[in-house]
Amino acid sequence: MTTVALLPAGSVSDEAAKLFFSDDSVQWEHHRMISDVFLSTVNNISNYSVIPIENTIDGSVSLHLDWLVHEVNLPIQAEWVYPSIQNLIGRRSELLNEYGQIDYSRVKKVISHPVAMSQCLQYIREYFPHAETEHVSSTAESVKIVADRPGEGIVAIGTKTASVNNKLDILAESITDHNNNYTRFFLVGDKPYTARENSNMKTSILVTLPEDYAGALHQVLSAFAWRRINLSRIESRPTKKKLGSYYFYIEIKYSLEEFLLQSALQEVEAIGCQVRVLGCYPSYKYEHLL
C-alpha cells in the first residue's frame, strides 16, 4: 500500500490528492504543517508528499519551493492541477438577524490559510471591512477552529469537504476573486510514480550563476532558445547565502532523456553555472484525472 503525506483532511490538498490517487490503494498521513508533510517522506514514514506549489491568483507558494530547494532532497515525481474552490464557512444560526437573513456585521474574525485568504481578498474587503483577519496553517484547520469556538463570531474560508467534516454551514459558495482559480501540486518522493500513463513530461532545474560572469543569465536562456526548448516557468529566489545572491528555478517542457535538453544543460554548465535537477516527471491536467 502507498502511504501519502499531505495537509489536513478537508484541505484543498486533501481533495486534490484523493482525486489524483482515486484508483490506488492509499494510506493517508495528514499533517498540520507543511514541514511535517515533507519530513514524513524524508524520514521514510510515507512514500510521497503532496505539496501545493503554485496558484492561479497568488502565484508561487514560496515557502514550499524553498523547502524543496533548501531543506530536503526529494525528487519531483508528478504534477497536476486542481480547482481551488473556496467557500465561506460558519454557523448560519449565529449570524441571522431578526428577518432571518445572514448579517455579516456580526462577524468579528475571518480565518484561513494565507494563500486561500489572498485568493478571496475582494470578497473580504467588500463584506468584512470591519472584521479582523487571521492566518492559520491550512484551510481545514480554520474550519475546525470555527467548529471548536461557537458563539465567537468567527467564520472560515475553506472547502465544502471541511464544512461537512465539521458539521458547519456553507454561508457563501465560491468566493474566490476569479472563477479560473487552480492550484498546482507536486508529488515528491524517492519512488518513481508510474501508476498513470502520460506523454507530457517536464523537467525542473535550479541554476546558480557564476558571480563574475556578465550576461550569464542571457547565456543560460540562449542555450534553450536556439534549440527551441520551451521554458514554462522561470523564477528567481534568494540562495540564502548572502544578500543579492539568487538561484533561478526553471521548468522545461522536455524530458530529461531528450538529447537536446541534455546538450543544453551541458552548455549551461560549461559557462560555469551550477545545475541541480529537481525532477523529471509527468504533468497532468485536471481533465486527465476525472
Image: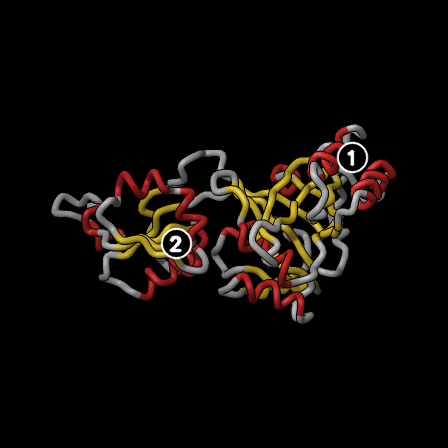
Amino acid type shown at disc 2? Ser
The picture places residue 195, in percent across and down from the top left corner, at 75, 51
The quadrant holding residue 282 is: top right
Figure quadrant of the C terminus: top right
Amino acid type shown at disc 1? Ala
The picture places residue 12, in percent across and down from the top left corner, at 50, 51
Give the residue number, with chain letter if any, for mark 2.
112
Figure quadrant of the N terminus: bottom right
Q: Is residue 57 above or below residue 48?
A: above
The picture places residue 289, in percent across and down from the top left corner, at 64, 42
Give the residue number, with chain letter if any, for mark 1.
223
The one of 177 and 211 positioned closer to us in this rendering: 211
Q: Is residue 235 above or below residue 195?
A: above
Nearer the observer: mark 1 or 2; the answer is: 1
The local crowd at label 2, few if under 14, some if 14 to 19, many if 20 or more residues have their Cα within 10 Å, is many
The picture places residue 222, in percent across and down from the top left corner, at 75, 32
Could you say which disc has been placed on residue 290 in the image? none
